């Protein structure tokens, strides 16, 4: 049984689940090179079919992450806010036109070209599939949005029972849903109706601080530790009010998500927090304090929800998290520190892209409830052969380097890293989701704090306040970090142990924390061997790991990797079994592909 899962309209993706096993998944952005591409996932479909070695003729059903006929909950929310706040109606009208106009399908706005998905495409799945190899003759199933999120994590957890928090900007009717997962079934415990949305609250203030919404939320999270949450109580009183049952109410006269997308903010919000920051303005202590306050409020509301859920199901000690808000790794880490649950699991793609996996799993279990579900690896994209890599060099007019054995590759790369040189590392299938998990990474020595400035200013070309993450051998994780569980998908922030902060300063944030990626020997054998070889040279089984990209989606193909390498000042490129020295190749200043 093969199920093709699809997500579109935001972080579009495709996935294939075969007899309960997730065998392929990729985001559309990796292939179109448009960050957060929300268009119909045509290229992602072709890619997962290729990885699985099938055509649409072999697909039994297509599962889509949204039930488009449930439009009335959204319509009621939009109508209410339009009547209550008519001065801000234009932003909503433009977004509605974008979602429902046949002429606008496949087109984003000038400011947000990635918002090119159309609600109407959800009603035309069969028509869209005609562009792909094979003839699809199965059924098309539309799955509840938050159930798609939940099913992207609960069945792969291996846990007999757990609570599940799914929260994001919003689904068909709700923005936050709490489930109980037990014996292979979901039971809904709580649902908070849209447009009350914790995700919209966080995203709107992201725009208020001058970051680009739908992308800059993690930047605000990185800025927050530099500030003091002096606006926290003010926000909890006026913007995001707690309710007694573990819920919340968003004051939409203050927080207007759609107006924020247009760069417009209510006067009442300006009176509460001061003037919004211009995108090119310097950061002040005031901006840092706003970021700290918003992060603190987000965490408090999230903790309230989980505490309420634990009271309803005190025997459920574990928690699965999904939805775009699950990318708030600082909040995830606080959950563990507070001891509200014994352990958490956040999938590699908790945002909407992960719904492609969740919808396919949901349909698989609907057809066969006794099916064993598994996702053995997050490396679900296409792997490339040495011949394909060689051809990518030749297409660039470059001589391919000598082919190395695995041992030679690991040893020479570890030597370079131990000399504090930076390596672009491209191996195997690409990771599913927004994190570089050791197959599409820039790697560096975490012992030298100065490497952060080199990476931020000269290679990644990003803000200096943003932290870098560590990858570590699973066996040494507790030696370096206050973390008593694995973090295989880099979705948990933990404190760096006090005696290790000076040992690995390049991956220790200003507040003494790090976004930890634990690497098991079975999960990624080659990357584990590299970490092990680095440890033998330095005594530290930890590397600085950041995504292999420069102001673009993470590289997907050898061509992308070579292109990005040539535009960077990175010392080495390890692409498959080949190792390239930067000085042996010409520099370029803009993307070639």
Image: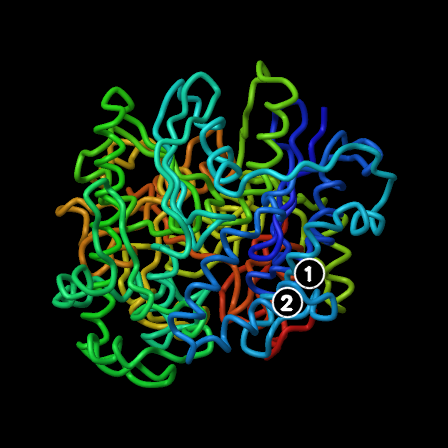
Tell which of 22 and 61 is nearer to you: 61
- Total marks shown come to 2
**Element type at marker 2?**
helix
Q: Which residue is mark 2?
A: 563
Vertical placement of 214 versus 16: above or below?
A: below
* Viewport quadrant of the C terminus: bottom right
Q: Position of residue 183 (x, y in %)?
A: 44, 16
Residue 256 as seen in the image, left or right of residue 79 = left
Q: CA distance from mark 1 to mark 2?
A: 6 Å
* Viewport quadrant of the N terminus: top right
Tell which of 401 and 546 is nearer to you: 546
Taking the spot 78% from the left edge, 51% from the top edge, the residue there is 128
Tell which of 267 and 160 is nearer to you: 267
**Element type at marker 1?**
helix
Asked if the residue at tag 2 contacts the one at tag 1, i.e. Cβ–Cβ closer than 8 Å, the answer is yes
Within 10 Å of disc 2 (Cα), the crowding (few <14, some 14-19, many 20+) is: many
Q: Position of residue 280 (x, y in %)?
A: 37, 85
Q: Position of residue 447 (x, y in %)?
A: 28, 55
Label for residue 559?
Answer: 1
Taking the spot 35% from the left edge, 72% from the top edge, the residue there is 463
């Amino acid at each position: 049984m093969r199920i093709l899962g699809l997500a579109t309209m935001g972080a579009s993706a495709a996935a294939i689940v075969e007899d309960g096993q997730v065998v392929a998944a990729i985001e559309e952005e990796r292939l179109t090179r448009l960050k957060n591409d929300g268009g119909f996932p045509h290229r992602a479909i072709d890619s997962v079919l290729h990885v699985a070695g099938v055509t649409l003729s072999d697909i039994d059903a297509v599962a889509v992450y949204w039930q488009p006929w449930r439009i009335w909950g959204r319509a009621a929310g939009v109508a209410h806010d339009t009547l209550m706040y008519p001065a801000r109606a234009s932003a909503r009208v433009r977004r509605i036109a974008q979602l429902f106009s046949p002429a606008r399908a496949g087109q984003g706005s000038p400011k947000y070209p990635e918002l090119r998905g159309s609600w109407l495409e959800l009603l035309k799945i069969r028509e869209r599939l005609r562009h792909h190899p094979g003839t699809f003759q199965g059924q098309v199933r539309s799955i509840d949005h938050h159930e798609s999120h939940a099913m992207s994590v609960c069945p792969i957890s291996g846990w007999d029972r757990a609570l599940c928090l799914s929260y994001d900007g919003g689904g068909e009717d709700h923005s936050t849903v709490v489930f109980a997962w037990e014996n292979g079934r979901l039971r809904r415990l709580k649902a908070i109706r849209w447009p009350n949305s914790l995700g919209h609250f966080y995203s709107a203030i992201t725009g208020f601080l001058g970051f680009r919404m739908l992308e800059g939320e993690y930047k605000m999270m990185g800025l927050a530790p530099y500030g003091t949450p002096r606006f926290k109580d003010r926000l909890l009183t006026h913007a995001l009010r707690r309710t007694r049952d573990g819920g919340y109410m968003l004051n939409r006269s203050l927080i207007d998500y759609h107006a924020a997308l247009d760069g417009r903010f209510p006067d009442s919000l300006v009176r509460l927090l001061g003037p919004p920051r211009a995108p090119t303005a310097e950061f002040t202590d005031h901006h840092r304090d706003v970021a700290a306050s918003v992060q603190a409020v987000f965490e408090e509301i999230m903790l309230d929800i989980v505490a309420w859920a634990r009271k309803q199901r005190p025997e459920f000690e574990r928690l699965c998290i999904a939805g775009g808000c699950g990318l708030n790794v600082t909040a995830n880490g606080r959950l563990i520190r507070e001891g509200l649950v014994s352990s958490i699991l956040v999938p590699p793609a908790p945002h909407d892209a992960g719904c492609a996996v969740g919808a396919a799993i949901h349909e698989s279990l609907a057809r066969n409830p006794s099916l064993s579900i598994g996702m053995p690896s997050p490396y679900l994209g296409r792997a490339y052969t040495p011949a394909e890599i060689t051809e990518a060099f030749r297409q660039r007019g470059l001589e391919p380097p000598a082919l190395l054995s695995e041992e030679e590759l690991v040893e020479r790369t570890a030597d370079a890293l131990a000399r504090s040189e930076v390596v672009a590392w491209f191996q195997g299938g690409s990771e599913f989701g927004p994190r570089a998990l050791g197959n599409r990474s820039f790697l560096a020595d975490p012992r030298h704090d100065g490497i952060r400035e080199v990476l931020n200013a000269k290679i990644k070309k990003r803000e200096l306040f943003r932290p870098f993450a560590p990858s570590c051998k699973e066996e040494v994780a507790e030696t370096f970090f206050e973390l008593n569980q694995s973090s295989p998908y880099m979705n948990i922030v933990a404190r760096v142990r006090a005696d290790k902060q000076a040992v690995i300063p390049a991956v220790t944030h200003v507040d003494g924390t790090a976004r930890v990626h634990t690497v098991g020997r079975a999960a990624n054998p080659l990357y584990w061997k590299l970490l092990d070889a680095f440890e033998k040279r330095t005594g530290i089984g930890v590397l600085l790991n950041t995504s292999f990209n420069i102001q673009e989606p993470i590289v997907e193909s050898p061509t992308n990797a070579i292109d990005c390498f040539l535009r960077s000042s990175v010392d080495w490129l390890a692409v498959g079994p080949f190792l390239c020295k930067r000085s042996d190749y010409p520099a370029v200043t803009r993307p070639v592909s």
